[in-house]
Image (spheres, helix red, strand yellow):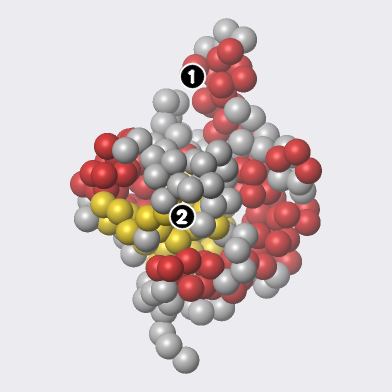
Amino acid sequence: MASAKYDRILLKLSGEAMAGEGNFGIDPHSAEDLATTIKEIYDLNIQIAIVIGAGNLWRGTVGLNHGMDRTTADHMGMLATVMNALALADALKRVGIDPRVQTAIEMRAVAEPYIRGRAIRHLEKGRVVILGAGTGNPYFTTDTAAALRAMEIDADLLVKATKVDGVYETDPKTDPSARRFDTINYIDALNMGLKVLDGTALTLCMENEMPIVVLNLWQPGSLKKIIMGDTSAGTLICS
């Protein structure tokens, strides 16, 4: 059997990955399906860290549209990511994986505080580390948190899991003729405003030469293909 191309990855998940009907809330079946997908690559002895969003529970724009303070709205979003992290950790346990939840905002009763060295040690011991509460700061997205944590833990690859099979020139939902990129460099992705990751996250990855793959996590076998070096399952963003 061929060996994996990457030893350690940071997997960025949207909150919707945990949702059921209507893309809202936490659905146990969705969490179980996600855990099973993660286990496919965990069984290849890949070290996995995860950053998860909170769009299934809270969107700050809703609060902002009603006059809410941006910092308050962002802090609510960070807390929602911890709820998703705990639910995913529970699902991972049930498929035989030993997870650890770490948070950028201390809440020791439910999770460890994020400490870089401890996170790396967990990975080296074969645990999946779920990193909640974003960066711990308002005005930063979970995309930026994923890019930052990928650099901090010395990941080989940042995987952005979406519901489309890569990066397109325009929205394939509204433009059936949209061109899909197999590979694109950071500058072009930024200049074209492709909305793959936010600009801060993309710039951070570019400055530190962190490769990114965008893929459809719900396409069977797509994540495993990427891990084995077959980039046809998604779009590679690199220098």
How crowded is the residue under tag 2: few (<14 C-alpha within 10 Å), some, or many (20+)?
many
Specify the label residue 71 is tagged with: 1
> What secondary structure is marked by label 2?
loop
Residue 57 can be seen in this image = yes
Task: Name the one closer to the observer, 169 or 176.
Answer: 176
Residue 23: percent from left, percent from top: 71, 40
Which numbered disc flags the more N-terminal residue, 2 or 1?
1
- Which disc, if any, is residue 52? none
- Callout in the foreground (2, 1): 2
Residue pointed to by mark 2: 166
Q: 90 above or below 188?
A: below
Q: Please determine whether, in this image, residue 234 is positioned above or below residue 160.
A: below
89 lies left or right of 193: right
Say which residue appears at 39% left-offset and 40% top-offset.
194
Q: Relative to 106, is 216 above or below?
A: below
Residue 227's x, y, as percent?
44, 72
Do the CB atoms of the residues marked 2 and 1 lie less than 8 Å apart?
no
User: Left or right of 203: which side holds 2?
Assistant: right
Q: Is residue 210 visible?
A: no
Task: Give the total number of marks visible in the rendering.
Answer: 2
Tell me where residue 71 appears, x and y as whole percent: 49, 19
Give the residue drawn at x 67%, y 68%: 36
Whether residue 89 is situated above or below residue 133 in the rendered picture: below
